[in-house]
Image (tube, rainbow, N blue to C red):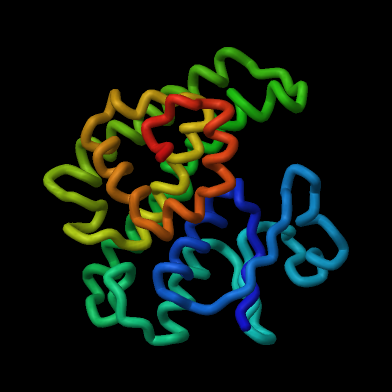
Amino acid sequence: MIKLYIDWISQPSRAVKAVLDILKVPHEVKALKIQFDEHKSPEFTSIHPLQQLPLLQDGDFTVAESHNIMRYIIKQRNISTNLYPLTDIRQQTRIDQYLDYHHTNTRRCLHLYHSVLISPIKGEKVIPEVLEKEKQDVAKVFQYFENNWLKGRNYICGDQATLADISACCEMMQLDLIKFDFQKYPITNAWLNRVIRIPEVYQAHHVAFKIIKKQNPSSQFLK
């Protein structure tokens, strides 16, 4: 059986877990906690020297990088799905275009989350100018979603959710831990509510929601 190594607080980990559940691919979850350096253990390092999560083991074959894992599962098992349609090269290209954009744009949400919540916990100094730049970077991402990715569409690549939406949703949801004002961006906020309500996506956030209940009990996403 496939083994999936994840940290439930890791945005890419949650995205991969949600996709495997949506596709009903049997797998065993191996949960590690990055905050306790469990991903740096000799056992895991022997599997993946880069010590990064998520990671998938399919027999004797190891697959790293969340977007790569998602596509691998669909292609390797020849799964027919709107998440990444194997017979529609143009839709694949649209999805891949967003997934490439994600790494250097939407992923900036992580920097702001870290500065606001994690750095104070670790006793790390937060430079005001850097924090302000991170806020501006995230604002630009949300503005681009409002004006481009979601303009005239229900989802990033059309009328149905794809790998792009799941990856983006899991990334942005991290900001709910720092009480980010999603409602400043109504189009993106409505889209986010659609994606997070996909049962498998919501379930993948079950650990994150426990923290959100403490950090942000008035969150619009809590049931």
Q: Is residue 212 above or below residue 64?
A: above
Residue in the picture at 48% in, 33% down? 175
- Report x, y in % for residue 33: 73, 50
| Extreme residue in the left direction | 152
Q: Is residue 38 above or below residue 63?
A: above
Q: Quadrant of residue 95?
A: bottom left
Residue in the picture at 43% in, 40% down? 172
Q: Closer to the camera, 104 or 9?
A: 9
Residue in the picture at 59% in, 23% down? 116
Q: Is residue 180 above or below residue 66?
A: above
Quadrant the C terminus occupies: top left
Q: Closer to the camera, 9 or 111?
A: 9
| Extreme residue in the right direction | 42
Position of 169 with respect to 14 (left or right) is left
Q: Quadrant of residue 99?
A: bottom left
Q: Closer to the camera, 130 or 20?
A: 20
Position of 155 with respect to 152 (left or right) is right
